[in-house]
Amino acid sequence: MSSHVFGATLIGVEGLKVTVEVDFLRRLPSVAIVGLPSLSVRESADRVRSAMLASGFDFPRQRIVVSLAPADLKKDGTGFDLPIAAGILLAAGRLDPERCARYLLVGELTLGGELRAVRGSLAFAALARDLGMTGLVLPPGAAEEAALVPEVDVRIARTLGQAAEFLGGALELERARPGVAAPRSGPLDLRDVRGQPGAREALEVAAAGGHNLLMEGPPGCGKTMLAARIPSILPTLTPDEALACTRIHSAAGLLGGGGLVSERPFRAPHHSISPAGLVGGALLRPGEASLAHNGVLFLDEFPEFPRHAREVLRGPLEDRQIVLARAGGSTTFPANFMLVAAANPCPCGNLGHPTRPCVCGESARQRYRARLSGPLLDRIDLRVELSPVTPAVLLAGGPAEDSATVRARVERARLRQRARYGGAVASNAALSAEQVLQAATPTAAALNALQRHMEVQGLSARVGRRLLKVARTLADLDDDASVAVEESHIHRAVGLRLDDADALGAN
């Protein structure tokens, strides 16, 4: 008679229940795993055999058939070790069927019978809750993550023997407590930045409205230094945002048993990254764009990224999600990130430098500027030029405005946005095309100013809407501003965006 227990697999950031059915046949001893198992799942047979013997259990001398249902879903990962071992023990009459039916089992086994954590435990806990199951049995490290989900009984099993005793009713396992995130140590502060008032203003506006930002300037003018300090002025994560970030990082295996993600993510991949590394590859794991959800994706040396890697971001920048379809299946990743990019004005980087001459030819400059396509630049709300800071400014003794002061203004602007949108939209930058005019409520003079600028510069409708979003953020930052966007806000928004023809090095 066959037995069945319940495991789970991870598809993107969502957990899916897998029924593990085990049957014994009177044939030569072997183990057959069916149901589209990957190589790592097929290898479970050897790990389970060694773990059971090391834990003092007899391994059946029969043909063991393990079926993973649904059979048309590709199964991957080592988390099926524990449910396969439990299924064999249940078929042998060593476990309690009723208790096995109430708990979701996930974990990797060592050859000595110990349990190792696997990624995605937060999604598995949410799955158990949604299915109405009592809880989960997980290894240390994974259990603390799963305990972040309320109303789920998460038990910690350190070995196969402990899990078997619990599922047999002979032992009560320890209940997991939610992990505690490590506090940030020594955050960078804006007071370290000397000069660059235009770039500082752009950083504040970007943080307050969630806008995309491109900083252009010669090497050493402070682009990377400014970008590294963006996390210090970002608003605090809401509980829903923190849980969403934690779920993605859990699916990527980055939590390490920690608690809720407490700070907005800041991801800064190298410019050699592939498109799959940015948005996710064949294994349907989160890419850097999803890991930056509710935070910042910083791309330094933006034109040096492979063209396809840059262009693949056009969809996420517009839709704020990534629909990934690969041979292993399809899934949707959240990707509501703020893009911050830095670029030199030319290949040598010295175009526009007050003392260093540019050695690039005009054709080289044009090719460099052409690396960023018009559709991609249209999706960037703020584009500012930075110049090298003079020694007099750099060595001035007066203190600059610190991050705490700027962050307080950013928090007030975000509170206004949450009150306006009621949680339906996270920030001004996330407004849809249909919502922009209603949210901005521009005056007639503001609309006329925007129309004149679009006609003179030949801007697209997308750019016009983004300028209106930036103006809405400027109004939110202005404590004395009325509900409507005024003409002055439009002019300031235009001033924070280089014209397309002036971007990347044109004077």
Image (spheres, rainbow, N blue to C red):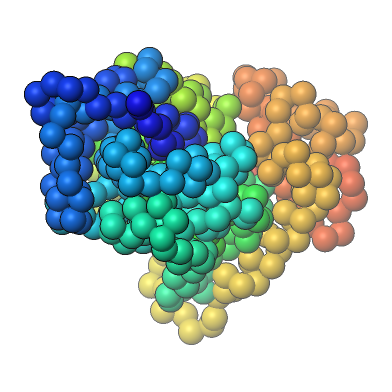
Estimate the x, y position of residue 237 in percent, counting from the top left. Answer: 62, 57
Above or below 139: residue 272 = above
Quadrant in which the C terminus is drawn: top left
Q: Nearer the viewer, residue 225 or 436?
A: 436
Left or right: where 175 falls relative to 48 = right
Expressed as whole percent of the image width and height from the top left, the position of residue 63 reads 17, 26
Name above or below for residue 300 compared with residue 142: above
Quadrant of the image occupied by residue 287: top left
Look at the image and tell me whether residue 236 can be seen: yes
Residue 349, given in percent of the width and then of the height, sits at: 29, 45
Q: Which residue is drawn at 57% across and 74% down?
A: 402
Image height check: is 256 above or below 335?
below
Q: Can residue 316 be seen in this view?
A: no
x, y percent for residue 313: 44, 29
User: Could you say which is closer to the camera, residue 320 or residue 305?
Assistant: 320
Give the camera-side residue of 396 and 123. 123
Instruction: Identify the residue at the far left of this view.
Output: 28
Q: At x 47% / y 31%, what residue is drawn?
A: 16
Q: In this view, does 435 lie to the left or right of 244?
A: right
Which quadrant is the N terminus positioned in?
Answer: top left
Which of 500/213 is in front? 213
Residue at position x 66%, y 33% from top? 466
Q: Name the residue at 82% across, 37% down.
A: 440
